[in-house]
Image: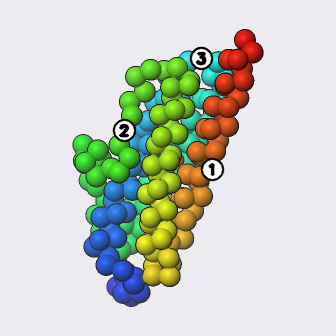
Amino acid sequence: MGTRGREIVGIDVDKLLVLLNKAYADEWLAYYQYWLGAKLAKGPMKDAVIAELTQHAADELRHADMLTLRIIQLGGTPVLRPEDWPKFSNCGYDAPEDPFVQKLLEQNIKGEQCAIGVYKALVDLTANKDQVTYNIVLQILQDEVEHEEDLQSLQEDLEIVMKHR
Ligand code: FE
Ligand code: FE
Ligand code: MG
């Protein structure tokens, strides 16, 4: 923990650490949901869907990495046990029980929309108060907005393909 680095944070650091850990738990669950969904996916445009889910899985894992480094930098402890991820999570975990591409897209779009809300709140909370965390959560928000659009445009293409079959 950097003492001066912690001092310049203009909000309650302990409260911030709880929020960062909740987002951290979200990222691991999102990672696994995408990663497993990419293995199971079936249906039309499967290859395009698998490529996108795989790329998003890598992004979510990178987000977990960014958050854990900041948590440690602020003197916090990242969630130590995977079994605690669902307890901390804001957005939860939607098991890919139905491997049909449309169902997977639906579940992951729901997750992205939840993530956008989480990071929008963190961006608003840290703006002008904690520039270092702000920069991290803004980068993640940009990715989550891109993720939602990627999945919704796949969903649109899929509807066209199904309609013209
Ligand atoms: Fe993410
Ligand atoms: Fe995402
Ligand atoms: Mg993408």
Residue type of the residue flagged with mark 2:
Tyr
Does the CB distance between marks 2 and 3 fall below 8 Å?
no
**Residue pictured at 34% horizontal, 56% vertical:** 22
The quadrant holding residue 6 is bottom left
Residue toward you, 2 or 19: 19
Q: Alpha-carbon distance for marks 2 and 1? A: 20 Å
Q: Quadrant of the N terminus?
A: bottom left
- Where is mark 3, residue-wise? 43
Q: Name which of mark 3 and mark 1 comes first in the sequence.
A: 3
Element carrying mark 3: loop
Q: Position of residue 99 (x, y in %)?
A: 48, 21
Disc 1 residue lies near ligand 3 with CB under 8 A: yes
Residue type of the residue flagged with mark 1:
Glu
Q: Name which of mark 2 and mark 3 comes first in the sequence.
A: 3
- Where is mark 2, residue-wise? 93
Q: Name which of mark 2 and mark 1 comes first in the sequence.
A: 2
Does the CB distance between marks 2 and 1 fall below 8 Å?
no
Q: Alpha-carbon distance for marks 2 and 3? A: 22 Å
Q: Of the numbered discs in the image, which one, if any, rests on residue 110?
A: none
**Residue pictured at 50% horizontal, 82% vertical:** 128
Farthest residue in the top direction? 165
Q: Is residue 149 visible?
A: yes
Disc 2 residue lies near ligand 1 with CB under 8 A: no
Q: Is residue 7 left or right of residue 109?
A: left
In the depicted structure, whether residue 129 falls above or below residue 105: below
- Where is mark 1, residue-wise? 146
